[in-house]
């Protein structure tokens, strides 16, 4: 029997209402995803964020990674509430504390295990020859601290050289051009500079056991302290997703390196040069800490971290970087660790039974 036009209209309206409800429900589900904005350098050691997205390791989070090559710009954005997470080198915590910024170092990331090197030009035979010379570093970054430690270890005052503030490609160019006598470079710039300068020497490498034990040259991950306070559950989920991604990479290094290369717009060869091919972290210049290693370094789980480090060494690390920033005049005084470090998210994960 043919339906009346009124009945048909009512059925069409009902069907439309159900369809609209389905669309709204779908949009609501999408909108329910918590947004997590992450920034960091174009650096393979931060490529876990791309793996999270590619492998859908955080289905209820919308995690986006933005490459920002100036870490101080990233931290300014975090301080203004425009970023939740920053992956960066690990020296910023005392600087943030000195400015009362809502920035907390929440975990240790990757140990530089050969990727950072101090190179000398052929005419420079020792640290002593650097007195009065220019050296290329990132002023206010770990390369400056590494060069300062190298000089003092070899009997040369840290302030007897002129520190030239340049980013890595410019530092390599300055070495090649001869405008500086030494530079602290990380890969792939260190290998490129050595190949381009006949007679240049490698004076120090973070592969040396003394550098690994102090753990001074490393990456870390930072979070907005206000965001942690207001969205602690999301912060914990974000941290878990990152360690899930690291665990996935360790089991699938070839596919993982391709994902990172695509995300960072780098060659797979350059990714492998930094984090290796086999997932061990020992066949390259950067050792990514898994969850338990990072938790132990932070004192959030029992046991000892690798490389002769000790449980809870994060506080010593913070103190050492703070001391060097006082020497360099970057900060004026020593600041309590809890002004720059927060290991409690790692502790929450460990107490929940998570082991990475």
Image (tube, rainbow, N blue to C red):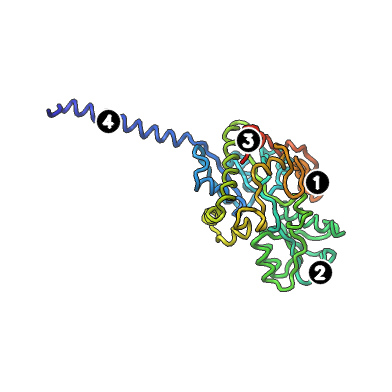
Q: Which mark sits nearer the N-terminus, 3 or 4?
A: 4
**Mark 4 sits on what residue?**
15
Q: Which mark is residue 125?
A: 2
Mark-to-mark CA distance, 3 and 2: 49 Å
Q: Quadrant of the C terminus?
A: top right
Label 1 close to label 3 by CB (< 8 Å): no
Image point 63% across, 57% down: which residue? 274
Label 3 Cα crowd, 10 Å radius (few <14 / some 14-19 / many 20+): many
Against 293, is 182 above or below? below
The span from disc 1 to disc 4 (Cα, nearest Å) is 69 Å
Q: Where is residue 264 in the image (x, y as percent from the top left)?
A: 55, 55
- Label 2 neighbourhood size at 10 Å, few (<14), some (14-19), many (20+)? few
Per the image, label 1 sits on a secondary structure element best described as helix
Residue 229 coordinates in the image, percent (x, y): 63, 31
- Counting residues from the start of the chain, the first of labels 1 and 4 encountered is 4
- Residue 107 at x, y percent in the picture: 67, 42
Which of labels 1 and 4 is toward the front?
Answer: 4
Q: Name the residue beneath numbered marker 1.
A: 323
Residue that carries the numbered disc 3 in the rendered image: 349
- Distance from the alpha carbon under mark 1 to that under mark 3: 31 Å
Identify the element where label 2 is drawn.
loop
Q: Is residue 176 above or below residue 39?
A: below
Q: How far apart are marks 2 and 1 (CA)?
A: 29 Å
1 vs 3, front mark: 3
Q: How crowded is mark 1: few (under 14 residues within 10 Å), some or many (20 or more)?
A: some
């Amino acid at each position: 029997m043919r339906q009346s036009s009124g009945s048909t209209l009512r059925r069409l309206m009902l069907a439309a209402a159900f369809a609209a409800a389905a669309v709204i429900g779908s949009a609501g589900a999408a909108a329910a995803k918590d947004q997590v904005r992450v920034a960091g350098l174009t650096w393979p050691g931060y490529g876990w964020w791309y793996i999270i997205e590619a492998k859908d390791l955080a289905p209820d989070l919308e995690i986006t990674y933005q490459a920002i090559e100036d870490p101080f710009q990233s931290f300014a954005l975090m301080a203004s509430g425009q970023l939740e997470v920053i992956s960066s080198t690990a020296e910023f915590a005392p600087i943030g504390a000195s400015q009362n910024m809502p920035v907390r170092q929440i975990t240790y990331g990757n140990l530089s295990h050969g990727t950072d090197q101090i190179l000398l030009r052929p005419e420079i035979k020792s640290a002593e020859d650097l007195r009065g010379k220019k050296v290329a570093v990132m002023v206010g970054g770990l390369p400056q601290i590494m060069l300062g430690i190298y000089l003092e270890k070899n009997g040369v005052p840290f302030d007897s050289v002129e520190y030239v503030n340049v980013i890595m490609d410019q530092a390599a160019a300055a070495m090649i051009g001869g405008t500086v006598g030494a530079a602290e470079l990380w890969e792939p710039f260190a290998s490129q500079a050595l190949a381009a300068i006949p007679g240049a020497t490698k004076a120090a490498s973070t592969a040396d056991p003394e550098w690994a034990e102090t753990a001074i040259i490393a990456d870390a991950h930072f979070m907005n302290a206000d965001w942690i306070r207001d969205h602690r559950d999301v912060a914990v989920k974000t941290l878990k997703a990152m360690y899930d991604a690291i665990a996935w990479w360790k089991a699938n290094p070839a596919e993982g390196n391709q994902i990172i290369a695509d995300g960072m717009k780098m060659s797979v060869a350059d990714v492998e040069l930094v984090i290796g091919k086999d997932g061990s972290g020992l066949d390259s210049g950067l050792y990514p800490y898994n969850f338990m290693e990072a938790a132990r370094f932070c004192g959030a789980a029992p046991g000892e971290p690798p490389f002769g480090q000790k449980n809870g060494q994060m506080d010593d690390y913070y103190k050492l970087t703070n001391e060097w920033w006082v020497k360099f005049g970057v900060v004026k005084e020593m600041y309590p660790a809890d002004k720059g470090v927060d290991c409690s998210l790692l502790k929450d994960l460990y107490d929940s039974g998570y082991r990475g």
